[in-house]
Image (cartoon, rainbow, N blue to C red):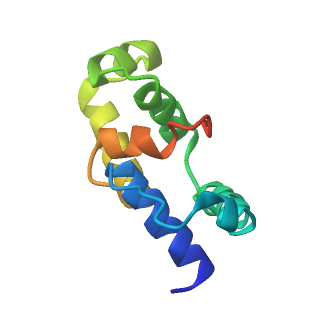
Amino acid sequence: MGGTDAVKTIALKKARGKFVIEVPVILRIPVLMDLVRERSRWLSGINLTKREKEVLDGIVRGLQHKEIAGMLNISARTSKFHASNLFEKFGVRDRHELRNLFSEGDKR
């Protein structure tokens, strides 16, 4: 598995609540730091529209589609459309997995 694929897999496992470090952490710190840097590059390499970024911000903050829609002056259906695009771009199944990708302070 290539480095970027490994980072994506780790990010998705973490998002799905399956993130477990099996090797003593102290022995793996340099590797973990490389993975963190690579995860950041992977996330920053995903192209988002302005509206997708706004909807992502709402999802990460825990808002419902109706609340996001009200903030952005769009319909809840349009918010859901943008959320679906986000799920596809980040390779997650739902808003909970998407929130988990950004749960460690890596909010955009």
Give the x, y percent position of residue 24. 57, 63
User: Is 53 above or below relative to 47?
Assistant: above
Is residue 104 shown left or right of residue 31?
A: left
Residue 99 relative to residue 77: left or right: right
Please give the name of the residue rendered at 51% of the width and 86% of the height, measured from the top-left corner.
Answer: 1
Q: Nearer the viewer, residue 7 or 77?
A: 7
Residue 53 image position (x, y, % from top left)? 54, 38
Image point 72% across, 66% down: which residue?
34
Q: Is residue 34 above or below residue 61?
A: below
Coordinates of residue 45 in the picture (x, y in percent): 64, 62
Residue at the image point whose x is 40% and y is 44% from the top: 98
Residue sitting at x 68%, y 67%: 27
Left or right, 93 with reference to 46: left
Q: Name the one closer to the observer, 86 or 70.
A: 86
Q: Looking at the image, how many numbered discs can be counted on the residues? A: 0
Q: Give the percent coordinates (x, y) of residue 86.
A: 41, 49
Instruction: State which quadrant residue 96 falls in.
Output: top left
Image quadrant in which the C terminus is located: top right
Outermost residue toward the bottom in this view: 1
